[in-house]
Image: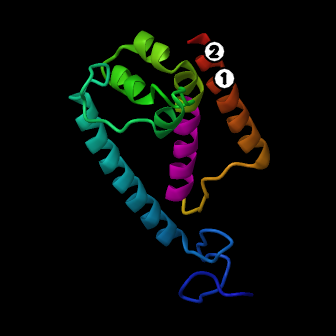
Amino acid sequence: MTPHGPTGSTGPGTPTGGTDGTDAAAVRRRTLRTAAVALGAGALAAGYLWHTNPHQPGQLLLPCPFRLLTGLLCPFCGGTRMAYDLMHGDVATAFHDNAVLLVLGVPALAYALTRWLADGLRGRRRPMKLTARGNAVVLGTAAVWLVARNLMG
């Protein structure tokens, strides 16, 4: 048998986190640490956004670099306004801000993060990556949405 994990122990009862030999406890700790940092950063950003209405001019928010360079709406434009509206319970306005991001992006992100967290807590590493088909679907959807929303005005 080959050694498993950082201690070099062998046997069927040795927890492993994946093909790279990482033990399950280390994967769980790393997952919890990453999730805690992301949750903290997200809470800080949500707290700031709660009090900063992006629908009002003059707010201190990051501008879209694509829109600054081209004058066109990117597939994510309206995402900040959408998040603000969702936090304040205004789903209809959030849909108006960015319909595709709300209907497809939010559920897809929630699914991917939940799956990553569940596997990490089970001690299994799950890299956050898409297959070639997944990349084609995401990029194709983004391209169609970019064209459609700029033609609609």
Question: Gap in Å between the C-alphas at discs 2 and 1?
Answer: 6 Å
In the picture, measured across the screen, residue 9 lies left or right of residue 58, that is right
Question: Disc number at residue 151?
Answer: 2
Q: Are marks 2 and 1 in contact (CB under 8 Å)?
A: yes
Segment tinted magenta in the rendering:
107-121
Query: Residue 13, percent across and down?
Result: 62, 75
Query: Residue 117, percent across and down?
Result: 50, 51
In the depicted structure, whether residue 77 falls above or below residue 56: below
Q: Residue at x 54, y 38 (%)?
A: 109
Crowd around label 2: few <14 · some 14–19 · many ≥20 (10 Å): few
Query: Residue 60, percent across and down?
Result: 25, 35
Q: Residue at x 57, y 54 (%)?
A: 119
Query: Residue 80, percent across and down?
Result: 39, 30
The residue identified by callout 1 is: 147
Q: Residue at x 46, y 18 (%)?
A: 97
Magenta span: predominant SS is helix
Of 140 and 87, which appears nearest the observer?
A: 140
Q: Residue at x 64, y 68 (%)?
A: 18
Q: Is residue 66 magenta?
A: no
Label 1 amino acid?
Val
In the picture, measured across the screen, residue 129 lies left or right of residue 140, that is left
